[in-house]
Image: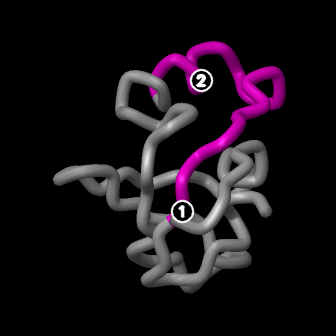
Amino acid sequence: MTLDRVPVGHSARIVAVDWSRLVEEEAQRLQALGVDVGSTVEVAHRGVFGGSDPIALGIGRMTVALRKVHAAAIEVEAA
């Protein structure tokens, strides 16, 4: 399953990221924020406009906003 399909309030572990689907600078920024293989994330909130964009992820003690197109490039499994 991809991260964009995880319901609000659920956690998931990142098992793969298709970095080629992202602009290099965006990929580097996400990795610096901890969005990478092995990380556990929780979908904290989804935007209400434009198809639920952005998605707010809890990563450790941080909250990171992620566009739905970026979340679709991240493969996850239930945590």
Comes first in the chain, label 2 or label 1: 1
Residue 26 lies in the magenta stretch:
yes
In this rendering, position of residue 33 left or right of residue 61:
right
Circle 2 — which element? helix
Q: Nearer the viewer, mark 2 or mark 1?
A: 1
Residue found at the far front of this picture = 79
Please, is residue 37 above or below residue 3 in the view? above
> Whole-percent x and y of residue 24?
66, 14
Please state which of residues 58 and 38 is positioned toward the viewer in this rendering: 38
The residue closer to the viewer here, 26 or 31, is: 31
Q: Amino acid at mark 2?
A: Ala
Q: Which amino acid does the dot numbered 1 rest on? A: Ala
* Image disc number at residue 26: none
Whole-percent x and y of residue 48? 56, 85
Single out the residue that lies furthest toward the left. 61
**Residue 32, image x, y percentages:** 38, 23
Q: Is residue 61 above or below residue 31?
A: below
Instruction: Report the label total.
Output: 2
Disc 1 designates what residue?
A: 12
Residue 27: in magenta span: yes
Q: Identify which residue is drawn at 17% across, 53% down.
A: 61
Determine whether label 2 and label 1 are within 8 Å by CB: no
Look at mark 2 in the image and give the residue it sits on: 27
x 43%, y 77%: residue: 45
Which segment did they paint magenta? 12-29
Name which residue lies at 38% across and 34% down. Answer: 34
Residue 56 coordinates in the image, percent (x, y): 43, 64
Distance between mark 2 and mark 1 Cα atoms = 19 Å
